[in-house]
Amino acid sequence: MNKIRLAGIAYESLVNGPGMRRVFFSQGCKHNCLGCFNEDTHDFLGGEERDIELLIDDLKNNPMINGVTFSGGDPFEQADKFAYMAKKIKELGLNIWCYTGYTFEYILENLNKREGWEELLNNIDVLVDGKFEISKKIDGLKFKGSTNQRIIDVNQSLKNKKIKLIEF
C-alpha cells in the first residue's frame, strides 16, 4: 500500500490557491520558521499515515474541486510520495499548487540529490517558495504569508530557464 504522512486535509478551501481546492498538509518540516501558522506539522513523526489511493479516489468524487494544494509542513520532505500523488492528480485534470520553505533556485540545484524532487517539481503547476519571514508579513497578501515568498509558474519557469512570477 502506498502511504503518505499528513498533518491534515482541508477538503474544500478557497484560500490556498485559486478556486475550490483540496489541501493536503504534509507532516514534517525542517525550516521551523518563526511565527509559522502550522507548527504542529513540523514533527516528522506526527500526523498520521494515509493511503494515497484512497485520497485520490476521494478527489474523483467531488466535482466542485478545481485544484489541489500541497502545503505543510513541507511537501518536499516527502517529495517522492507527493510526486506520485501529483501524477495521479494530473490525470484527473486538476491544477496543482505546492508550498515549500525551499527556494526555487535551491530546489533546482538539488534536483538530483533528493529523492523525488525532480519528479515533484515537474508535476506541479505553481510553486509558492521561500520560508515564512514574520518581519515580512503583511496582512492581506494573497496566497502567501510574507513578501519574500514568490508564486512561481513552474512550467513556464522550467521551459524558459527563467523564473516566471504569477501576480495576484
Image (cartoon, rainbow, N blue to C red):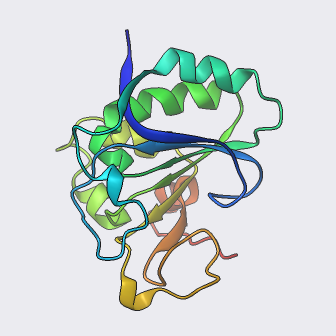
Vertical comparison of 87 with 2: above or below: below
Relative side of 85 to 140, left or right: left
Report the label total: 0
Identity of the residue drawn at 55% across and 52% down: 155
Instruction: Point out residue 138 in the picture as x, y percentages from the top left corner.
Output: 54, 88
Depth check: give the residue in front, 148 or 109: 148
Vertical comparison of 6 with 136: above or below: above
Q: Within the image, what quadrant is residue 10 found in?
A: top right
Instruction: Point out residue 116 in the picture as x, y percentages from the top left corner.
Output: 31, 36
Q: Quadrant of the N terminus?
A: top left
Identity of the residue drawn at 65% across and 83% down: 140
Identity of the residue drawn at 40% across and 36% down: 6
Q: Within the image, what quadrant is residue 82 found in?
A: top left
Instruction: Point out residue 127 in the picture as x, y percentages from the top left corner.
Output: 50, 58
Furthest toward the top, the residue is: 1
Depth check: give the residue in front, 80 or 27: 27
Relative side of 2 to 150, left or right: left
Q: Quadrant of the C terminus?
A: bottom right
Relative side of 78 to 14, left or right: left
Instruction: Point out residue 69 in the picture as x, y percentages from the top left corner.
Output: 57, 47
Identity of the residue drawn at 50% across and 75% down: 145
